[in-house]
Image (cartoon, rainbow, N blue to C red):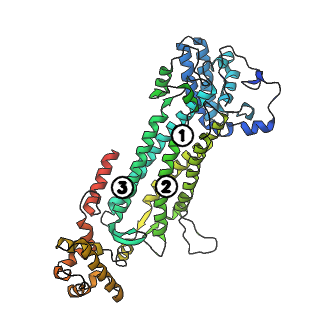
Amino acid sequence: MTDTTSSPDNAAQPGKAWSGRFSEPVSDLVKRYTASVNFDQRMARQDIRGSLAHARMLARQGIIAAADLADIERGMNQILGEIERGEFAWNLDDEDVHLNIEKRLTALVGDAGKRLHTGRSRNDQVATDIRLWLRDAIDTILALIGEFQRQLLDVAEANAATPMPGFTHLQVAQPVTFGHHLMAYYEMSRRDAERFADCRKRVNRLPLGSAALAGTSYPIDRESVAAELGFDEVCYNSLDAVSDRDFAIEFCAASALLMTHLSRLSEELILWMSPRVGFIDLADRFCTGSSIMPQKKNPDVPELVRGKTGRVNGSLISLLTLMKGQPLAYNKDNQEDKEPLFDTADTVIDTLRIYADMITGIRVKADAMLGALSQGYATATDLADYLVKKGLPFRDAHEAVALAVRAAERRGCDLPQFSAAELKAAMAEVPGAADRLDEDVFAVLTVEGSLASRKHIGGTAPAQVRAAVARARAQLG
């Protein structure tokens, strides 16, 4: 996009909006290298919306005639129809979406089309189009996050009391429920939604009226354009307005975090689906087979989510690198903002759509989850807590239980399989530990007892998981 602020009667030489300044045509190679119409044409609807709001303001301010506005509205409606029907002829020679539409408008309505660009530049025009387009994308993403959350809550509620191992360092740590585990991803997605909603506030500021970089000498009314287009406010510095891409970087950062969360969930689904773990199975529609191994069922969708996360992270780095060395105001470098931005939005939207469906296709293997809890002394911490509640200092309790675990490893059994006398013998080296053990210890060594004891807000007790789901449903409305 090149600086091209026009006056009402500006009649540029044929071919380019700026061709009168140059003595030779642009080479075909440069045309291909500098053109953006192949990817920015997806902003055509936003470009038309912005242009119509601009034209109406020009007419209200007496800058163009009412007859010109009527012609512009008629021509733009025809162009929009051509685009929606796939009949619009996009032309590389016209560089970008803006000049393609403007050239077609002029062909349809004559001089009125040439007057449309009065008081604006492609610099503030493209900045407006991107913000309009991105605002629509964010609204789509927020709706899809909500759908993903609702599906996640359904599965979490159904498994509020389904025991599974909680892990640290991928080692069995303590019992949790599958519902509690999934609710961790709800909390991540809630933060994601907050970030996108907050990002939208900074997207929703109108740059139009800043012209090339310094504003315009025409008596424009930027606030009325902002109101018509649904912007919360205008951008208050013309230099910043045309060169700012913070909002795009912020969007990509929010997207990278969302994809990171989904990548973590994907990694767990992949692990849980492995026959060596066997906690879940995924519906066949999200998996593929092998061309040589007939028994294979590969979790391709979670694997691709994991892979596409790197793609979104790369887009964020691309935009940060794009902006880091630019002086004010607009520079041609900024043409390179769109492809990573568009690709990021497409990837996030597609991923959320497929994930909301995939969550419903999880088949939980509760017996395998429960069986895994017998393999890692998952209630050892509960035994330590029991001793502390009986008056033993925590560090002594920790040591006593560590000795009991070592004894269980030698025997090849789990802690609940000891008798009270055997537990006391295993802890005998720690003064006072054995004396505090009674038969009631076995109530805390069960998985059910461990889960039920964590009954505070945020804990894994089934009642608290159900409460968390209810709270989340209230948040979603």
Q: Position of residue 284 (x, y in %)?
A: 51, 65
Disc 2 residue type?
Answer: Thr
| Nearer mark to the viewer, of 3 and 1 | 1
Element under disc 3: helix
Determine the image quadrant of residue 385: bottom left
Residue 398 sits above or below residue 358 on the image = below
For the residue pair 57 and 336, the one nearer the viewer reads as 336
Neighbourhood count class around disc 3 (C-alpha, 10 Å): few under 14, some 14–19, many 20 upward: many
Count how many numbered circles sit on residues in the image: 3
Whichever of callouts 3 and 1 sits on the residue coming sooner in the sequence is: 3
User: Do tag 3 and tag 1 residues touch (Cβ < 8 Å)?
Assistant: no
Q: Which residue does the image show at 47% across and 44% down from the upper left?
A: 141
- Cα–Cα gap, marks 2 and 3: 20 Å
Report which residue position mark 3 lands on: 153
Q: Which residue does the image show at 36% across and 55% down from the upper left?
A: 153
Tell me the number on the disc at residue 58.
none
